[in-house]
Amino acid sequence: DPRRFGCWLWSKDDHALLEKLGPEPLSSNFSGEYLWNRARKRTAPVKSFIMDSRIVVGVGNIYANEALFESGIKPQRRAGKISLKRYEALAENIKIILSSAIEQGGTTLRDFTNSRGEPGYFEQSLSVYGRAGKACVKCNQPLKEIRLAQRSSVFCRSCQS
């Protein structure tokens, strides 16, 4: 990734940089109950909360937008004000969306290619990310774009609360 969001470190033992990371979202350690418990009394927006690697690793901007849309949750809603039931739906949607993105080779937006030089095809499945001003795939209302923590957030004012 040319933006250098990550790096490779080789270590024989548990590395200090890994100690404070949250669970992998496709693991059995990640659930709606886990998110709900971690969110108690937090005032940060839920989108920032699920993108925080201390909470869960690997949920980037694209997948956070998509999972929140599928779960009917506005990205700017306070993390501590979301019910267990909605966190259960959100955790499940994160798993579904990430699995689908992996199956489709990732999300090619500009010049991303995999290790074989092939583009990812998940972009064709995006419901909200990169679609500000376009019609919502569920209700046909225009999608709105805002900035949260210096990141683009696209959502439907009608379908997400």
Image (cartoon, rainbow, N blue to C red):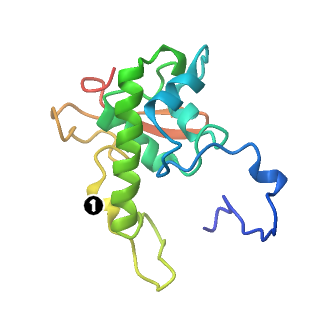
Decide: is 128 above or below 155: below
Q: Quadrant of residue 88?
A: top left
Q: Position of residue 81 (x, y in %)?
A: 48, 14
Residue nearest the viewer, comparing 71 with 14: 14
Decide: is 114 above or below 145: below
Q: Position of residue 156 (x, y in %)?
A: 30, 30
Q: Secondary structure at mark 1?
A: helix
How packed mark 1 is, by other alpha carbons closer than 10 Å (few <14, some 14-19, many 20 or more), is few
**Number of marks present in the image shown:** 1
Q: Is residue 13 left or right of residue 86?
A: right
Q: Position of residue 116 (x, y in %)?
A: 47, 86
Q: Is residue 126 visible?
A: yes
Outermost residue to the bottom: 116
Taking the spot 47% from the left edge, 28% from the top edge, the residue there is: 33
Q: Is residue 111 left or right of residue 12?
A: left
Q: Is residue 130 visible?
A: no
Q: Where, quadrant-wise, is the C terminus in this rendering?
A: top left
Residue for badge 1? 124
Decide: is 27 above or below 22: below
Taking the spot 80% from the left edge, 52% from the top edge, the residue there is: 17
Outermost residue to the left: 139
Q: Position of residue 54 (x, y in %)?
A: 67, 39
Taking the spot 60% from the left edge, 67% from the top edge, the residue there is: 1
Disc 1 residue type (three-letter) = Gln
Taking the spot 47% from the left edge, 76% from the top edge, the residue there is: 113
Q: Quadrant of residue 10?
A: bottom right
